[in-house]
Amino acid sequence: TRDTPRTMKLSAVVLALAMMGASALTGTRQFMEQDAQMIGKSPQWTQKARATASDDVKLQFWLKHNSTQIAAFEEELLELATPGSPSYAQWMSRDEVAAALSPAPHSVDAVASFALDHGASDVHVNKMRSIVSVTVPANVAEEMLQTELFHYQNNEYKGVSIVRAAAAYSLPVEIAEHVSIVGDILRFPRLRQKLQIEQAKPDGADTGDEWSTCGAAYSAYTNPSVLASTYGFEFPFTKATAGNSLAVAEFQGQYYDADDLEAFSSQCGLDSTVTVTKNVGGNNEARCQVGLEPCVESLLDIEYAGAIAGAIPLSVWYSDTFSLLDWAETLLDADDAELVHSVSYGNDEAQQTSADYMESVNTQFMKAGAQGLTIMFAAGDQGVWGREGVGKTYHPDFPAGSPYVTAVGGTDFVTKSTIGEETAWASGGSGFSDEFSQPTWQSSQVAEYLANPDADLPSSSVYNAEGRGYPDISALAGQVNPYFISFKGGKFSAVAGTSAACPVAAGIIAQINDARLAAGKTAMGWINPFLYQADSSSFNDVTSGTTNGGYTGGFTATTGWDPATGFGSINFSNLKDAALSY
């Protein structure tokens, strides 16, 4: 007989079969995200009380895309992003993307009806018509998904609590055929580890050059003037072209405050105070005065993205859901999304819930790139080993390994406090994706690297040579000359990490966008194919250093592209000229 959703129980036998790859069907239901690991548990989270009817749970049903449509769309997008193509940089509108990729209307209707049948009163369909969202009491969500939901508390950030499933979840087969995943029901976010921060120690050395622009006492630290001299971008950038924009994304309680933006701008003698033009998702300045290291990550992003972008409007997108899926949906639903987005957030691929989860996020990045948005992610701060640590294989980063984001790795100056040659930062995120295959636009560069005897390659058993290689580019990130920042009401500190490199690179790309817009051209959009066709003079090649994370192994930087620093850091003048030539 047919079990109803209310009475059906998931037997241990069926669960075991599903884990073994046998049929994932039980009665009239299908288990979702069958390759999910560590369901209902995480070393970073502790299970607390069962969720009750008083707890509202947001369910996001991410609908399946037609694989044939995806393949055709990817081909078209590659044409749009490849310099020399007749359609180069002729980006699509949101409606055009939706028309090309939206699931069939009956898929939306089926999932919406499923939610309404369970008492949901407000069913939301996103503007891409690919996500159906409802907020329901936890007991209703349990009934819909045939699982049990619990509160989980983060072990490090005690004030952070989320609701997740303690067991596998399923959907009726007639609904499951339309759904890829139910977003963030299983996934436990790995909250961003605290940045490598130290108190900025005055050393009293007045060098009389760029190093002293934030005060002679702080001449040992990287600052906006040092970056401008190193990479050659316009500084200060005092006049922006209409329509240009830049954004940074913040998560997990990382807010910002005007006092620190003013203190940083004043101390470093900026032409104008770094300001946030638009805030999406809210801000809580009071939080920046509480705790040992409040708001450090967000202030680092904003201070350096803002200092480099100058007059280009800067937005902050804040998400308290700890979800890249949720951030991506909000971004794609916006009518006026910024042209460049810097995100210093990510984890290992091995720490993601499932392949379906990563592929769903990747599809959102693809849609963003098609609309002329540049999505940039920090490559990580643990070298090839990732957050999982040293093991039998390297642990590639997600989403830095997505082909539709530009991954930013890390460098150090070869000689402390000397502007010039850079070397790979040992802890810069680096490697090859285990989930995403190697795209054609980087295959020749990867082949050259793998064939280069100077690469001194690690054993082929520890990495996937056929995966998407990253990073694409790099910027200063290491501890030789860490970044000078202001936080906690004007307290000065020094910070290292690709979380610093990413907003720097994003600010530079925003300036290049400005040059294109001023010339009557479109924004750079999905920039990766352009980077891989650019002349080597567009970059400051990094040819030394290994990304071993302070342990063993890693990838060694060589001439040309490498999975230690990508093409190296940006040579602004030459990369801008290349961008203007198409």
Image (cartoon, grey):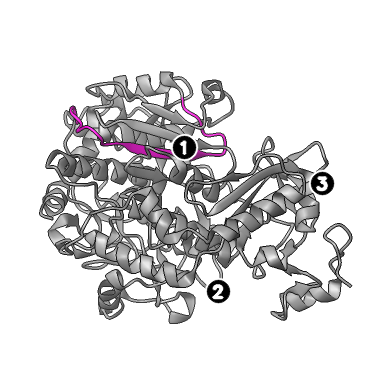
In the image, residue 384 lies at what x, y percent?
A: 45, 64
Looking at the rendered structure, the secondary structure element under dot 2 is: loop
Q: Is residue 34 magenta?
A: no
* Rendered-image quadrant of the C terminus: bottom left
The vertical placement of 93 against 174, above or below, is above
Residue at numbered disc 3: 139
Vertical placement of residue 510 versus 267, above or below = below
Separation of residues labelled 3 and 2 (CA atoms): 42 Å
Numbered range of the magenta stretch: 237-256
Horizontally, residue 520 falls left or right of residue 493, namely left
Mark 3 and mark 1 lie on one chain; the one further toward the N terminus is 3
Q: Tell me how far mark 1 sits from mark 2, CA to CA.
A: 31 Å
- Disc number lying in front (3 or 1): 3
Picture layout, residue 155 above or below residue 464: above
* Residue holding disc 2: 392
Disc 2 residue type?
Lys
**Residue type at mark 3?**
Asn
Between 242 and 322, the residue placed more toward the observer is: 242
Figure quadrant of residue 63: bottom right
Q: In terms of secondary structure, what is the magenta stretch mainly?
A: loop
Q: Amino acid at mark 1?
A: Glu
- The image position of residue 410, as x and y in percent, is 35, 53
Mark 2: give few (<14), some (14-19) or many (20+) Cα within 10 Å.
few
User: How many numbered circles does the render carry?
Assistant: 3
